[in-house]
Image (cartoon, rainbow, N blue to C red):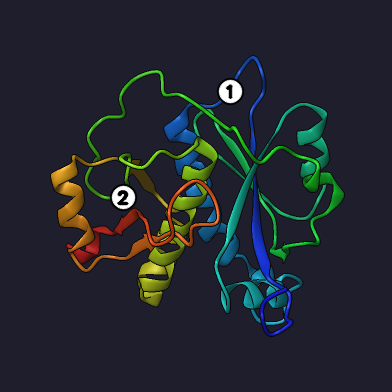
């Protein structure tokens, strides 16, 4: 509950991490980020849609996101719940409508939330021209699961900052985006650029107010 007695909502995301075939780190980050506008733009999240009240309650407070991992039977049980599965090259992430912080479905509450660590087989290439870029601060020590939540916040701020035409074009294109980590000097420039910046609330892993992600969209250049 919040200080005024209203329920606090959180957006659950579950990443599929099979023991013998885990996803690549950057692909998992990008897939998690795309899952956020996917649920925000879904017709069930708007108007009188079945998820609309939960989405409104969540967005009117902290846009908190929690990433958990699943494999095998855990993943299959999770996919039976209402939600959206977003796929990348190697990653699968399922996003669910917001739930009260203390009211997770049992199929999700039993999943592990800490210790999600993934690797990239090679250094990600320089960002191509065109897609949105979520610049991730790698100077902070964060687990992959925490990073997934942070880039999800970045995609959320990106969505809020867009006009209606940009939102619709981005949706029709499948929410193209990349996640990259800039050099320290470039990071300082980005934080001071006026672009949307994620400042973490400090619930886990990093200090309150830490700048974790800067969201950049091509038409803003």
**Label 2: few (<14), some or many (≥20) within 10 Å?**
some
Q: Position of residue 217 (x, y in %)?
A: 28, 59
Q: Position of residue 68 (x, y in %)?
A: 66, 42
Report helix, strand or loop for mark 2.
loop
Q: Residue at x 68, y 85 (%)?
A: 4
Image quadrant occupied by the N terminus: bottom right
Name the outermost residue toward the right.
106
> Would residue 116 be found to the left or right of residue 8 on screen?
left
**Label 1: few (<14), some or many (≥20) within 10 Å?**
some
Report helix, strand or loop for mark 1.
loop
Q: Position of residue 180 (x, y in %)?
A: 31, 40
> Would residue 91 be found to the left or right of residue 84 on screen?
left
Q: Is residue 87 visible?
A: yes
- Judging by the rendered image, the residue that carries numbered circle 2 is 131
90 or 185: nearer the viewer: 185
Q: Is residue 174 visible?
A: no
Mark 1, mark 2: which one is toward the viewer?
1
Q: Position of residue 3 (x, y in %)?
A: 66, 80
Image quadrant occupied by the C terminus: bottom left
Q: Quadrant of residue 49?
A: bottom right
Position of 172 relative to 131 (above/below): below
Q: Quadrant of residue 166?
A: bottom left
- Judging by the rendered image, the residue that carries numbered circle 1 is 22
Q: Residue at x 40, y 18 (%)?
A: 121
> Would residue 106 be found to the left or right of residue 137 on screen?
right
């Amino acid at each position: 509950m919040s200080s005024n007695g209203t329920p606090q909502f959180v957006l659950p995301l579950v990443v599929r991490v099979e023991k013998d075939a885990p996803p690549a780190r950057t692909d998992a980050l990008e897939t998690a980020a795309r899952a956020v506008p996917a649920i925000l733009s879904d017709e069930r999240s708007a108007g009188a849609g079945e998820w609309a009240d939960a989405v409104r309650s969540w967005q009117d407070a902290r846009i908190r996101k929690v990433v958990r991992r699943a494999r095998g039977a855990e993943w299959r049980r999770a996919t039976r719940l209402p939600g959206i599965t977003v796929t990348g090259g190697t990653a699968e992430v399922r996003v669910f409508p917001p739930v009260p912080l203390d009211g997770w479905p049992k199929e999700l509450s039993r999943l592990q939330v800490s210790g999600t660590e993934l690797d990239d087989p090679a250094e990600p290439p320089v960002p191509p021209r065109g897609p949105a870029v979520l610049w991730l601060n790698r100077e902070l020590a964060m687990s992959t699961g925490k990073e997934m939540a942070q880039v999800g916040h970045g995609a959320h701020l990106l969505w809020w900052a867009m006009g209606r035409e940009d939102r619709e074009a981005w949706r029709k294109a499948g929410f193209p985006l990349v996640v990259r980590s800039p050099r320290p000097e470039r990071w300082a420039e980005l934080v001071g650029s006026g672009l949307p910046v994620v400042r973490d609330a400090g619930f886990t892993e990093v200090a309150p107010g830490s700048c974790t992600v800067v969201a950049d969209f091509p038409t803003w250049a």
